Image (tube, helix red, strand yellow):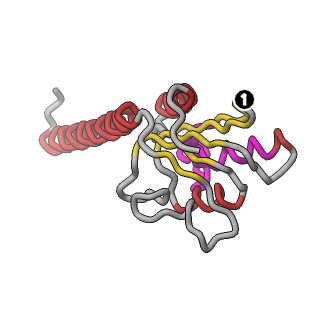
Amino acid sequence: MEHVPGKDELYMKEAIAEAQKATELGEVPIGAVLVMDGEIIARAHNLRECRQNAIAHAELLAIDEACKKTGSWRLEGATLYVTLEPCAMCAGAIVLSRVERVVYGAADPKGGCAGTLMNLLEESRFNHQCEVVSGVLDAECGRMLSDFFRSLREKKKEAKRRARMESVEGETGIDR
């Protein structure tokens, strides 16, 4: 199976909608949907900050929901759509849950394990491999991430500026 024009974009837009939910919560905007037999059976977005849990990645949450819904840990025939290339942890869960296909938007040059740094999903030494389709709506997915991190840097810069101003005011006794 290769890129399925139209269908892949449709489901990636659903993953993007999940990523937008993450942004609203102050989370890194990563969203995922898991599709079986042409139906979305699970959707999730990052919740690491909200839950203070290192494994609350969108992919893992979607896989967990899909396993509960299907009553099986084997997600054979499933396609996972995710806005950012899976990390090593998520790639491992994808392989172990037998997901057939992964479609992702933006590549992750610092942690991508679906072809950028390494490709754990198509590694022939594992007992299961899954097909990878990269770059679906990558500009939109990448822009969401860039905008999020730009905003975060601006907020941190503003907080430092305010802290300096308060420090100066406290030292001089000047109230502005």
Does residue 79 lie above or below 4 as drawn?
Answer: below
Residue 31 is left or right of residue 143, and the answer is right
Does residue 143 lie above or below 75 as drawn?
Answer: above
Residue 61 is left or right of residue 160, and the answer is right
Total number of numbered labels?
1
Query: Can residue 56 be seen here?
Result: yes
Q: Position of residue 163 (x, y in %)?
A: 25, 42
Query: Considering the numbered disc 1 on the image, is that residue within a helix, a strand or a loop?
Result: strand
Does residue 132 lie above or below 89 as drawn?
Answer: above
Does residue 163 lie above or below 98 as drawn?
Answer: above
Q: Nearer the viewer, residue 49 or 145?
A: 145
Read off the magenta span. 44-67
- Tell me the residue at 64%/70% (across/down): 126
Give the quarter of the image for residue 150: top left
Residue found farthest to the bottom: 125
Q: Position of residue 135 (x, y in %)?
A: 41, 41
| Amino acid type, mark 1 | Glu
Q: Would you name the residue on which mark 1 appears? A: 39
Q: Nearer the viewer, residue 49 or 57?
A: 57
- Tell me the residue at 65%/59% (across/down): 95
Residue 98 is left or right of residue 157, and the answer is right
Q: Quadrant of the N terminus?
A: top right
Residue found farthest to the front: 1
Residue 24 is left or right of residue 51, and the answer is left
Whether 49 is among the magenta residues is: yes
Q: Quadrant of the C terminus?
A: top left
Q: Position of residue 3 (x, y in %)?
A: 51, 39
